[in-house]
Each structure stands twice: as structure tokens, then as C-alpha cells.
Image (cartoon, rainbow, N blue to C red):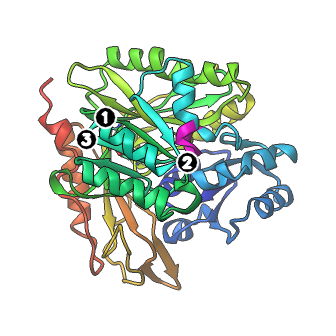
């Protein structure tokens, strides 16, 4: 079978890498892909990003299944378009993708279906937003309603920061339409977890748990990023907490979408905050896999991903059981100079070792020109290490990181600290 993976990041490299392990896969096209997918002989980059042109391509090439990585094509309706043309694709429709593409939609949905989340109100008028902030006090969280490529959330520790965020979004329109409405919500303290499941419309198949590291610098300091590293499993998610998240958040979400007449298919990612009493609340939904969470999760998946995808697009995920590598997988993101504000491109990358049983390097912002690999985006690589313990996984990952070089590279040295500090 021929497959198509849409996207160009580390997430898409990891999905394509995993799909390519299936005996039944003939070619996997990656649109547009990166330097890592270009170098893998089982994968083929195609330089197409427009959804309608991708549907033409899928038709001509007789693609069996298309898997979509990023949120932007999903929110633009790529799934609707493919389905109208009878093409099999795994992802949510444009309507269902509103769980991620509109914070107001997601909050109203959670409220309607009694799914635990922070208290909130939505505003488009700056004066009312400022009044609400004054009434509630700080810390408080200001979120642009629409997709803002990771720049739409301000966790304001002071009233000044909160008012400035409202001015930036509602008065100065710095985020354009995405910031024309804002959700202002209660600050939640605790530990964050990424809880990702596959949904075929009605059946839910949970993937292994994971934890991301959003801040750029060690000790969770510096600006927010797309994610600087992740590991799987997340030891904070005990079997008891897992059951509770399924019962209180995931199942009501999938059933709530059915009740609202917007059936959800695709990866569903609930970003959770677990408070110090162990209670989970939903910070946000994403309608896709996480990046970098996908890289450690796919490294641990032993089941044939093509088999899983076939059941996912045919509505029979209830018949699938996933088999996981019991080891911990830890992914360290290596980012370009000046990431996240203004990442530099064009630095030569050297020293990436071949894949072993203990380490795999996934590419994101890279480009391969003849034989030279250069940086081409903010997050450049995600180096995954596997090990019997969190410590071993971390050791294997950092041993590989230390072999790799590009000018200006930045990475965190403490990925996994929460899991390492945990007393079992
Ligand atoms: P989001 O894009 O909604 O995931 O938000 C980005 C980051 O902001 C999250 O990963 C959290 O670290 C933080 N965040 C979002 N909402 C809240 C909240 N209500 N309380 C505390 N932190 C939050
Ligand atoms: N790693 C967080 C995200 O993919 O949104």
C-alpha cells in the first residue's frame, strides 16, 4: 500500500518512520517532509502543501491512507475535502478540529458536557476584558481564540502582564483574527501531562502517556516553545489516574461530540494539569499528535501502525490492542540559534549517528541538499534515547546529542527531571 503523511516536522518524521516498518507498505510520501524524510529510502518527499493539490496527488497515486500531522491543514478542512472525494484519511473534519482551532468552542464544549477545566469567560471588547481581569486578579491566563502557532497563550503572573496581553490581542491586533476574541481563564497550578488517544468516531484507543517540556531553558525557565523534549511513559499517570482521565475527560469528549453532531475522528490530545491532590483538569485540546511527544511514543510502539491506521479509518479501533516497548523513551529537541523568536536557518549539521536499538534521531527543521544537511527551522532535531529506566533513556539520548553539532544549537540539559525526581 502507498501512504501519504502530511507535514514536515519531527512528528511527521516519527509517524512516517513507524509506518515504514510495516511489511505491507510500498512507498510513503511525505508532504513536504524534511531532510530526514528525504534521506530515508523508504520515504519520498513531495513538495505539495495545498489540500486540494494533495487530494489530486492521493487520487493519482492511489494512496491507501493519508495521515495528517499538523493542525493548520486540519482546521482548513483537508479531511472534509479528502472524504468528499472518497479518499481515506485519518484526522478530524474542520468542524471537529474546532476543539483546537477555537479556544472558545473548546471551553463552551467542556462547560456544556461537564468536562473538568479552568473557569473562564470569552471577550472581544477590551474594556470588559480589563474589568474581568481586575475582578479576578492575578495569576490569570489570556488565550487568543484562534490558532496562533504557539504564541496565543499568556500565563500572566501579574495584573500588568494580563492587561498587556489583552491590549496586544484585542486592541493592537498583533495576532490578527486569531486574537480578535480572547478566552480569559483561571490559572491552574500543578504538573502537565499529554494524554493522547486515537478516535474512530466512537471507539477510543489510548496511546502511551507522555510529558512535554514547554519552556526553552533548563529549570523550566525562559519563553514558551512548541516543546523542548518529551518522554514516555509519564510516571505521574498511574493506572488509577489513567482510568479517571478516560472516565471524566476523554469519554465525555468523544460522546459529547457525537451528541453535538460533530463526530470526532483522528488523534485527540488532551493537555492536562494534574493538581497536587492528583485531580486532572483539561488545559486544552489538540486535534493531532503532539510534537515532540510523538517521537518517544512512536519509538515505543511495537504494533504495526499501518494495521492500527486501517482500523482507525474503518471505525474498528475496538478490535485493536497496542503493544508497547516497556522501556522509557526520551526525546531531546535540538533547536536553532534564536529559537523561538527568530530561528536562524542555513547552519550545517554534522555528526548524526545511525539509528541503533537505543537511539533514533528524528528531523524537523532540516533540509538535505545533495549531501549537505542544514538547519531550516526552529526545532531542528529530536534525539530519542531508550532505556530500562528514565536515567538510562536520558543517558542514551544525551550521548547521541553530544555527537551532533550545528552552530548556535540550543537544547535543554534537564529533560526528564520530573520523572527522575518522582518517588514511587
Ligand atoms: P496551550 O497552548 O493552551 O497548551 O497553553 C500553553 C501553555 O500555557 C500550557 O502548556 C500551559 O503550560 C500553560 N497554560 C495554559 N492554560 C493554563 C492555565 N489555565 N493555567 C496555567 N497554565 C496554563
Ligand atoms: N508539544 C505540544 C504540542 O504539540 O502542542
294 w.r.t. 118: above or below: below
Q: Of tags 3 and 2, which is closer to the observer? A: 3
Q: How many marks?
A: 3
The answer to whether residue 359 is seen in the rendering is no
Evaluate whether residue 12 shows in this view: yes
Task: Look at 38% across and 75% down and name the residue there.
Answer: 342
Residue 279 image offset from top left, x and y in percent? 30, 20
The alpha-carbon separation of the residues under discs 3 and 2 comes to 47 Å
Between 114 and 206, the one nearer to me in the picture: 114
* Res 139 label: 3
The disc, 3 or 2, on the residue closer to the chain's N-terminal end is: 2
Q: Classify 77 as above or below 281.
A: below
Write down the residue under mark 1. Answer: 136
Q: Which residues are magenta?
A: 99-104
Q: Quadrant of the C terminus?
A: top left
- In the figure, residue 200 lies in which quadrant? top right
Mark 3 lies within 8 Å of ligand 1 (Cβ measured) = yes
Residue 21: which numbered mark, if any? Answer: 2
Asked if the magenta segment contains residue 100, the reply would be: yes
Instruction: Give 386 or 138, whichever is nearer the viewer.
Output: 138
**Neighbours of disc 1 within 10 Å: few (<14), some (14-19), many (20+):** few
Which quadrant holds residue 243? top left
176 above or below 326?
A: below
Q: Position of residue 32 (x, y in %)?
A: 62, 67
Q: Is residue 153 above or below residue 251?
A: below
Badges 2 and 1: C-beta atoms under 8 Å apart?
no
The answer to whether 227 appears left or right of 251 in the picture is left
Q: Tell me the CA gap for discs 2 and 1.
A: 52 Å
Closer to the camera: disc 1 or disc 3? 1
Amino acid at each position: 500500500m502507498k501512504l501519504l503523511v502530511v507535514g514536515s516536522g519531527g512528528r511527521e518524521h516519527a509517524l512516517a518512520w513507524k509506518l515504514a516498518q510495516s511489511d505491507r507498505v510500498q512507498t510513503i510520501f511525505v508532504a513536504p517532509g524534511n531532510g530526514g524524510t528525504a534521506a530515508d529510502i523508504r520515504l519520498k518527499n513531495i513538495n505539495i502543501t495545498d489540500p486540494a493539490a494533495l487530494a489530486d496527488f492521493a487520487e493519482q497515486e492511489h494512496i491507501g491512507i493519508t495521515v495528517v500531522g499538523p493542525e493548520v491543514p486540519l482546521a482548513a478542512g483537508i479531511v472534509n475535502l479528502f472524504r468528499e472525494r472518497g479518499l481515506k484519511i485519518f484526522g478530524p473534519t474542520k468542524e471537529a478540529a474546532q476543539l483546537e482551532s477555537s479556544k472558545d468552542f473548546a471551553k463552551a464544549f467542556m462547560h456544556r458536557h461537564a468536562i473538568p477545566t479552568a473557569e473562564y469567560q470569552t471577550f472581544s471588547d477590551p474594556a470588559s476584558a480589563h474589568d474581568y481581569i481586575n475582578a479576578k486578579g492575578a495569576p490569570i491566563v489570556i488565550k487568543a481564540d484562534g490558532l496562533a502557532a504557539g504564541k496565543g497563550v499568556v500565563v500572566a503572573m501579574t495584573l500588568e502582564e494580563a492587561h498587556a496581553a489583552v491590549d496586544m490581542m484585542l486592541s493592537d491586533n498583533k495576532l490578527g483574527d486569531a486574537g480578535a476574541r480572547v478566552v480569559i481563564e483561571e490559572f491552574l497550578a500543578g504538573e502537565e501531562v499529554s494524554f493522547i488517544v486515537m478516535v474512530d468516531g466512537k471507539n477510543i484507543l489510548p496511546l502511551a502517556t507522555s510529558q512535554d517540556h514547554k519552556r526553552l531553558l533548563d529549570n523550566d525557565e525562559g519563553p514558551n516553545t512548541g516543546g523542548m523534549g518529551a518522554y514516555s511513559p509519564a510516571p505521574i499517570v498511574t493506572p488509577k489516574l489513567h482510568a479517571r482521565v478516560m472516565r471524566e475527560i476523554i469519554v465525555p469528549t468523544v460522546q459529547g461530540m457525537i451528541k453535538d453532531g460533530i463526530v470526532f475522528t483522528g488523534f485527540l490530545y488532551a493537555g492536562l494539569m494534574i493538581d497536587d491532590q492528583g485531580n486532572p483538569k483539561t488545559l486544552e485540546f489538540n486535534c493531532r499528535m503532539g510534537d515532540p511527544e510523538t517521537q518517544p511514543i512512536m519509538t515505543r510502539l511495537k504494533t504495526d501502525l499501518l494495521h492500527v491506521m486501517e482500523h482507525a479509518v474503518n471505525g474498528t479501533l475496538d478490535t485493536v490492542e497496542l503493544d508497547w516497548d516497556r522501556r522509557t523513551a526520551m526525546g531531546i529537541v535540538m533547536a536553532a540559534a534564536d529559537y523561538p523568536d527568530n530561528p536562524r536557518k542555513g547552519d550545517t549539521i554534522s555528526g548524526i549517528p545511525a539509528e541503533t536499538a537505543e537511539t533514533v534521531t528524528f528531523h524537523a527543521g532540516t533540509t538535505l541538499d545533495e549531501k549537505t544537511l542544514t538547519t531550516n527551522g526552529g526545532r531542528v532535531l529530536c534525539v530519542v534515547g531508550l532505556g530500562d529506566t528514565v536515567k538510562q533513556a536520558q543517558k542514551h539520548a544525551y550521548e547521541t546529542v553530544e555527537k551532533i553539532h550545528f552552530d548556535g544549537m540550543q537544547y535543554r540539559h534537564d529533560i526528564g527531571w520530573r520523572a527522575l525526581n518522582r518517588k514511587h
